[in-house]
Image (spheres, rainbow, N blue to C red):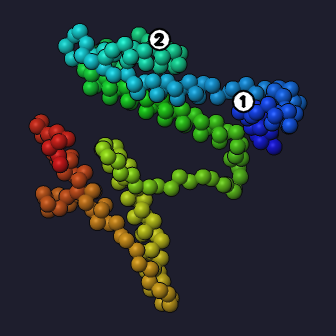
Amino acid sequence: MYYISFSLQLRQQSLSCQEIQKYKLDQPKSFRYLNQSKCYELVGEAIFRVVAAILHLGNIDFAKGKEIDSSAPKDEKSKFHLKTTAELLMCDSVALEDALCKRVMVTPEEVIKRSLDPLGAAVSRDGLAKTTYSRLFDWLVDKINNSIGQDSKSKSLIGVLDIYGFESFKHNSFEQFCINFTNEKLQQHFIQHVFKMEQEEYTKEAIDWSYIEFVDNQDVLDLIEKRNMKEMPRNIGIFSTNAIKTRSAAFSSTKFS
């Protein structure tokens, strides 16, 4: 009831004067049932700031810096997005630029800062955006779980499962390849337990049933992960081939295909 009532109050911003008069509505804080926890204040403002910061972060482009193999914001537009990102994340813009354009290596003796070229800075930018979004998402999940208040001693549980799915984009990264490989493994686990093992059990017990046809993706898994090194080079998977090729100094992602 609370959430429905509060949502109705929030809609005042888009309601017409006639509708406000019709329902005799006022500000949320004027109603006893809505003002006890001060929820009319925008508690999610920080979440919106982080999401906005990520969007601005993605618009920062880099160009060659004054030093060799260094980088800097490409133009005034990129400097604007850098400054805006820092303001939204409540950090120093100079420190943010330094973090994006340089890599820090920690050794037992000292801390070394190494400049990144424009491509390396772009990778650093994307990595920061991904990590920030991931941490925000994890924080939200923890917040929701804590709000639900699941009893650790409870024997029953109702959960939400995100079903795996294969994704294919115009440009697929190695990370996406690994994600799809995991999806294929999960699919094989499902096939193994629901179709293969179950129907084998039916056969052993002489149960009269109609055989269920299914598509077995084992060939796909063999193509990716097969490790029979004795049959090199034709019968090993993509992972093994990649591991062998990356040992060569002349190897590159373009040559792999």
Question: Residue at image x 56%, y 24%?
Answer: 49
Picture coordinates of residue 216, whole percent (x, y)? 36, 70
Compared across the picture, whether 173 is left or right of 6 comes to left
Q: Nearer the viewer, residue 158 or 1?
A: 1
Q: What is the crowding at mark 1: few (fewer than 14 residues within 10 Å), some, or many (at least 20)? A: few
**Circles 1 and 2: CB distance less than 8 Å?**
no
Q: Nearer the viewer, residue 234 or 53?
A: 53
Name which quarter of the figure residue 3 lies in.
Answer: top right
| Residue type marked 2 | Asp
Disc 2 marks which residue?
Answer: 92
Q: Nearer the viewer, residue 33 or 16?
A: 16
| Residue type marked 1 | Gln
Question: Residue at image x 47%, y 19%?
Answer: 85
Picture coordinates of residue 24, whole percent (x, y)? 87, 33
Q: What is the crowding at mark 2: few (fewer than 14 residues within 10 Å), some, or many (at least 20)? A: few
Question: Residue at image x 22%, y 10%?
Answer: 67
Q: Is residue 170 above or below residue 61?
A: below
* Residue lying furthest front: 18
Name which quarter of the figure residue 188 lies in.
Answer: bottom left
Compared across the picture, whether 140 is left or right of 232 comes to right
Disc 1 marks which residue?
Answer: 13
In whole angstroms, how far apart are the C-alphas of marks 1 and 2?
35 Å
Q: Is residue 184 above or below residue 39?
A: below
Compared across the picture, whether 68 is left or right of 32 comes to left
